[in-house]
C-alpha cells in the first residue's frame, strides 16, 4: 500500500487545507447515491445547502427557487424527498449540487435510471452552463452521453485510464470507418491497393480511416473500370466502438 503524506492540492488557487472554505465553495458534487435530509422539504433543503456555502438567507431562498424552477420541481417545493419519484430525486440531487453556483461541477452518473425526456433536459442544461464557463467533470456508463456532452474523454478500465483525448482524436486513433459500396460487374483484378477490403454479395466492404475523404478516390478508381456503383454507405466509428475495441468488454460489463 502506498502512503501518500505530502504534496498540495488547490482548487482555482485555493489550498484545500489552508483555505478549505473557499476551495469547497468552488465545487458542486452530485454523487450517484442520493444524500438527502428527509426531515426538510425541497425548498428548505436547497436553501440550507446554499446557506452552508455562505449565502445569506434571502439569497439562499432565491437560489432555491431558481433551482426548483430549472428542474421542474416547483410543484414539489413543500414535499420531502421521500415523496418524490426516482427521476425527481435525480433532479433534486443535481439541483443540490448547483444551488451555490459553483464554477466546478462533479456529476457521478447524473442520468442513471431517468427517462429519456429528463436525460435530454439535463443534457441541454449542462451544455448551457458549460457554455457559460462552468467546468463539468462527468462520469457515465452511457457512451452516447459522453460523446454528446464531453469535450475531453478518458476511458477507464479496471480502475486505470487506458486512453484519453477528444472524441475526434479517440475515433481517429482507435477507430476505423467502413465504406459499403454496392457494385455491378466487379472483377477481382480491380485491385484497390490503398485499402483493406472484402467483396461479397455485390458489396465492397472497405476499411477506411477517413471515409468522407476516401469516397471520391474510390469512385474515381471504380469508374475507370467496367464496374458500376449502385449505392454507397458509410458506417462511421462511434465512441462505443472505440470503447469495445480498447477494453474488449460490453458497455455494462
Image (cartoon, rainbow, N blue to C red):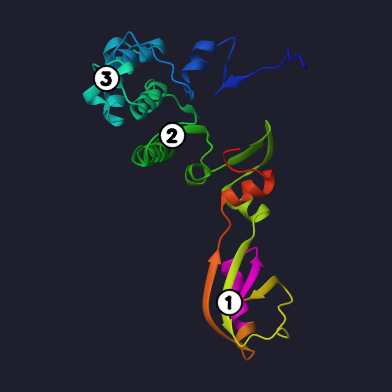
Quarter of the rendering containing residue 19: top right
SS at mark 3?
A: helix
Report the residue at 28% width, 25% height from top: 68
In this picture, which residue range is highlighted in magenta?
201-220
User: Residue 216's mark?
Assistant: 1
Most extreme residue toward the front, as rendered? 201
Displayed quadrant of residue 126: top left
Whether residue 123 appears in this view of the structure is yes
Q: Quadrant of the C terminus?
A: top right
Q: Locate residue 111 relative to residue 157 in the image: left or right.
A: left
Q: Is residue 33 left or right of residue 158?
A: left
Instruction: Determine which residue is flagged by label 2.
Output: 111
Instruction: Please indicate, yes or no, whether residue 59 appears anywhere in the rendered image.
Output: no
Q: Which mark is residue 62?
A: 3
Q: Residue at x 67, y 30 (%)?
A: 159
Residue 40 x/y as whole percent:
31, 10
Amino acid at each position: 500500500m502506498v502512503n501518500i503524506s505530502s504534496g498540495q492540492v488547490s482548487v482555482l488557487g485555493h489550498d484545500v487545507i489552508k483555505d478549505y472554505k473557499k476551495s469547497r465553495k468552488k465545487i458542486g458534487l452530485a454523487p450517484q447515491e442520493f444524500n438527502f435530509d428527509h426531515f426538510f422539504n425541497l425548498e428548505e433543503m436547497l436553501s440550507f445547502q446554499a446557506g452552508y456555502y455562505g449565502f445569506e438567507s434571502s439569497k439562499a431562498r432565491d437560489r432555491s427557487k431558481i433551482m426548483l424552477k430549472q428542474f421542474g420541481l416547483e410543484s414539489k417545493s413543500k414535499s420531502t424527498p421521500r415523496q418524490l419519484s426516482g427521476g425527481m430525486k435525480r433532479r433534486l440531487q443535481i439541483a443540490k449540487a448547483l444551488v451555490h453556483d459553483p464554477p466546478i461541477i462533479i456529476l457521478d452518473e447524473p442520468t442513471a435510471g431517468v427517462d429519456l425526456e429528463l436525460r435530454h433536459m439535463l443534457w441541454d442544461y449542462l451544455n448551457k452552463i458549460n457554455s457559460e464557463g462552468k467546468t463539468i467533470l462527468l462520469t457515465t456508463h452511457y457512451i452516447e452521453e459522453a460523446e454528446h456532452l464531453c469535450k475531453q474523454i478518458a476511458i477507464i478500465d479496471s480502475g486505470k485510464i487506458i486512453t484519453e483525448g477528444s472524441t475526434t482524436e479517440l475515433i481517429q486513433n482507435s477507430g476505423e470507418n467502413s465504406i459499403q459500396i454496392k457494385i455491378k460487374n466487379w472483377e477481382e483484378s480491380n485491385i484497390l491497393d490503398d485499402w483493406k477490403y472484402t467483396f461479397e454479395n455485390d458489396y465492397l466492404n472497405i476499411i477506411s480511416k477517413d471515409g468522407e475523404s476516401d469516397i471520391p478516390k474510390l469512385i474515381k478508381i471504380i469508374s475507370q473500370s467496367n464496374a458500376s456503383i449502385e449505392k454507397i454507405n458509410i458506417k462511421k466509428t462511434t465512441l462505443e466502438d472505440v470503447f469495445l475495441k480498447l477494453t474488449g468488454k460490453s458497455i455494462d460489463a
